[in-house]
Amino acid sequence: MVKTLYPTLPVLLVDDENAWLNSFGLTLQVAGINNIVTCNDSRKVMELLRAQAISVLVLDLTMPHLAGDELLPQVVLDFPEVPVIIITGLDQVETAVSCMKLGAYDFFTKVTEEERLVTGVKRAITFGLLRRENSSLKEHFLKDELHNPDAFSHIITHNKSMRSIFQYIEAIATTGEPVLITGETGSGKELFAQAIHSLSGRAGEFVAVNIAGLDGTMLADTLFGHKKGAFSGADQSRKGLIATATDGSLFLDEIGDLTAQSQVKLLRLIQEREYYALGSDIALSTNVRMIFATHQNLDSLQESGEFRKDLFFRLRTHHVHIPPLRERLDDLPLLLDYFLDEAASRLNKAKPAYPNELPILLGTYNYPGNVRELQSMVFDALSKHRSRTLSMDVFKKYIESRMGTANDIEEEVTGETVFSILGTLPTLKASGRLLVKEALHRSQGNQAIAAQMLGITRQALNWRLKQQSEKD
Ligand SMILES: Nc1ncnc2c1ncn2[C@@H]1O[C@H](COP(=O)(O)OP(=O)(O)OP(=O)(O)O)[C@@H](O)[C@H]1O
């Protein structure tokens, strides 16, 4: 299997001392940075940069023929997206400062502790990624096109915000950085995670884990695996899902449910790319791409202290929020058609025609279960369907029953009603007019559906509308 390289674009180390190139290259490899190119002749750097895209350039100041501070202005001019780290001698700090003014990203002295130097390189990799993403996003938005539309073929949509998310995902998919996907239940988070994996070009598997209900030990065992004898019943060593997802992507769903202890372990995994199997004190390293999802509001969880701030900010670097179905009702006709096809083939039935009003009726519902709920509504309707045209009755009954439940729950749980926010109550007449207006708005002017929402006959609605227009 092809070994996944990190970062996707190599780090270029330039120094005339081969010993330093080798030893620092090794240190970076141990820290999980295994995509490295070295060069011991500074005169060849521009040629190298032209031949190959680079994530970070680490440049020694003191070199024969062409010193680092002479080379820097050329690099900054021709390759502004590449962050440059300058390595100096102790007595060259002033030159290093002037390099910063010329556009270097950072500088370190050669005697700096290696750990700090590695952290500096990691920071520069992230910075370079963001810079590239930024320009790639700009290009995408200006052109409004996708390079790999096939990766999104399972996500049925023509909604504008969803297309923007596709573009964002295309820009970040190959970076290997963690991605956080938020959105209500059933909105399609797992489908997006799969799209990220398929765009990343990773050779390994896509492994999905729902961590809701797993306590700290079960989660650690699932992800990290265990050593033989780690706990009673552990007769054999077992590798965890992180190992299964090597060179691929690990999708962790419901991360809002993580215990405090598991949050610490996860942060370490993201930052250090390291973990320990249960019962073992040998650190294992991983190159897995992590994708996280939650339907919960992580913002409020971190404000209330239930979710670690550092983990929250680390995860938010690449954040995708999937809008709920009720905010993209323009997708309903497309989704209805798609799920009818899907249900027809699963039920081995012919795909029926449906009344033109059906998408309008469906648009009057608020879909707390999002696309998954629509999918099962359509499946249910088709399994009960007998004639040539799909009947609207099953959908009407479903929506009526759910809307009723939603109102009851609202009162039971909060003790509040929709009128609670009003200081003064409107008159019955005024509220009647408003209700009719809202129902017609929601039903896109379809009186039969509006009447049904209001619980009156179509004739009664017609009569009210006539009365109103005579008074206006
Ligand atoms: N845009 C879409 N096009 C086609 N199918 C979709 C779309 N969005 C969701 N689905 C379908 O709806 C169902 C739920 O999707 P998915 O599991 O990705 O949602 P989720 O947000 O991960 O849900 P949960 O939070 O409950 O885990 C799946 O069967 C999926 O195929």
Image (tube, grey):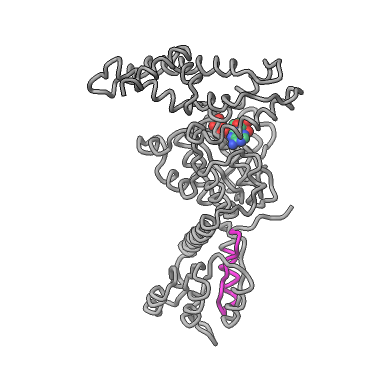
Can residue 221 be seen here?
Answer: no
Q: Name the residue located 41 percent from the left edge and 46 percent from the top edge.
A: 310
Residue ID at (61%, 27%): 375
Please give the count of numbered marks on the rendered protein. 0
Q: Nearer the viewer, residue 11 or 113?
A: 11
In this rendering, is residue 389 above or below 32?
Answer: above
In terms of depth relative to the viewer, which is nearer, 224 or 447?
447
State which region is magenta. 7-27
- Residue 8 image point, x, y percent: 61, 59
Q: Is residue 347 above or below residue 107?
A: above
Where residue 67 sits: x, y (%)? 50, 83
Name the spot of residue 14 as percent of width and height, x first: 56, 75
Residue 352's image quarter? top right
Residue occupying the point 43% across, 70% down? 107
Residue 429 x %, y %: 30, 16
Q: Nearer the viewer, residue 31 or 288?
A: 288
Q: Is residue 106 left or right of residue 269?
A: left
Residue 13 is one of the magenta-drawn residues: yes
Q: Height in image: 372 above or below 130? A: above
Left or right, 38 with reference to 437: right
Evaluate whether residue 234 shows in this view.
yes
In terms of image quarters, where does ligand 1 lie? top right
Viewer-side residue, 124 vs 225: 124
Quadrant (top left, top right, bottom left, bottom right) of the C terminus:
top left
Q: Residue lying at the far front in this picture: please name it.
A: 470
Residue 159 vertical position relative to residue 379 in the rendered view, above or below: below
The outermost residue toward the left is 424
- Residue at 58% across / 53% down in the picture? 145
Is residue 24 in the magenta section?
yes
Q: List the single residue furthest toward the right.
A: 348
